Image (cartoon, rainbow, N blue to C red):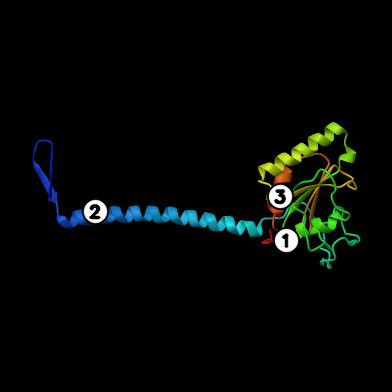
């Protein structure tokens, strides 16, 4: 047993073995509560983050998804879409590769790119015809910088001369116009709309 004394050596009392065990048990219980409390906070945070991915609000203007969004034979004209650039509609069974496109590579590029949107991609459509050479170079550099910062995951930048503004971003059923480039708004659109599409698990 542990003896307790005053400074002058006068005996004050002792702790019994039982008291020592009880005190040790109390400390162990307190430690366990702190550990499990911390684990609980982490678990709740992870669950909250996962839930937020499903309930977070989409960004940009909502465009009605075209009722008919079938696969059509490659190299055939997909027809007219309900927005420019498109956000849904007829498309080829092939999609375009991710990345930055300096020139148009296809006869009907929208039919490839809409398939990307169906897979949950976000696309930067840019129109350098509305800008001088320096402005075009600057815009392309800003887009590329944001794409790099976001890791390039499910991202495409594509020239689109029919735009009435220098830049439009789209995802499946969403569209956001930019009179001038806004990196934070572009990243917010991407984060809010990435994989919000019929086939989000497709590459």
Q: CA distance from mark 3 to mark 2?
A: 55 Å
Q: Residue at horizontal 30%, vertical 54%?
A: 28
Residue furthest out toward the top:
134
Q: Residue at horizontal 23%, vertical 57%?
A: 22
Decide: is 62 above or below 102.
below
Q: Nearer the viewer, residue 42 or 158?
A: 158
Q: CA distance from mark 1 to mark 3?
A: 13 Å
Q: Residues within 10 Å of mark 1 (few under 14, many from 20)?
A: some
Q: Residue at horizontal 66%, vertical 56%?
A: 56
Q: x%, y% of residue 147?
A: 71, 44
Decide: is 133 above or below 116.
above
Mark 3 lies on residue: 190
Dot 1 or dot 2, earlier in sequence? 2
Mark 2 lies on residue: 23
Label 1–label 2 contact, CB within 8 A: no
Label 1: state its secondary structure.
loop
Q: CA distance from mark 1 to mark 2?
A: 58 Å
Label 3: state its secondary structure.
helix
Mark 1 lies on residue: 197
Q: Nearer the viewer, residue 181 or 42?
A: 181
Q: Nearer the viewer, mark 3 or mark 2?
A: 3
Q: Is there any visible trace of residue 172 in the rendered image?
A: no
Q: x%, y% of residue 172?
A: 77, 58
Q: Nearer the viewer, residue 114 or 23?
A: 114
Dot 1 or dot 3, earlier in sequence? 3
Quarter of the image that includes the C terminus:
bottom right
Taking 49 as reference, is 104 left or right? right
Taking 97 as reference, is 52 left or right? left
Q: Residue at horizontal 84%, vertical 59%?
A: 111
């Amino acid at each position: 047993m542990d003896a307790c004394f005053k400074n002058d050596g006068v005996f004050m009392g002792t702790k019994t073995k039982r008291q020592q065990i009880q005190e040790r048990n109390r400390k162990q219980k307190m430690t366990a509560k702190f550990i499990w409390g911390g684990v609980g906070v982490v678990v709740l945070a992870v669950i909250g983050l996962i839930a937020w991915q499903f309930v977070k609000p989409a960004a940009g203007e909502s465009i009605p998804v075209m009722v008919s969004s079938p696969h059509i034979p490659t190299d055939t004209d997909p027809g007219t879409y309900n927005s420019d650039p498109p956000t849904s509609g007829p498309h080829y069974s092939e999609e375009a590769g991710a990345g930055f496109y300096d020139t148009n590579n296809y006869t009907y590029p929208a039919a490839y790119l809409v398939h990307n949107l169906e897979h949950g991609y976000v696309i930067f459509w840019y129109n350098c015809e509305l800008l001088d050479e320096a402005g075009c170079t600057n815009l392309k550099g800003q887009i590329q910088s944001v794409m790099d910062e976001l890791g390039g995951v499910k991202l495409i930048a594509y020239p689109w001369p029919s735009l009435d503004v220098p830049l439009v971003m789209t995802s499946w059923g969403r569209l956001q116009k930019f009179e001038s480039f806004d990196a934070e708004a572009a990243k917010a659109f991407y984060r809010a709309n990435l994989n919000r599409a019929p086939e989000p698990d497709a590459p």
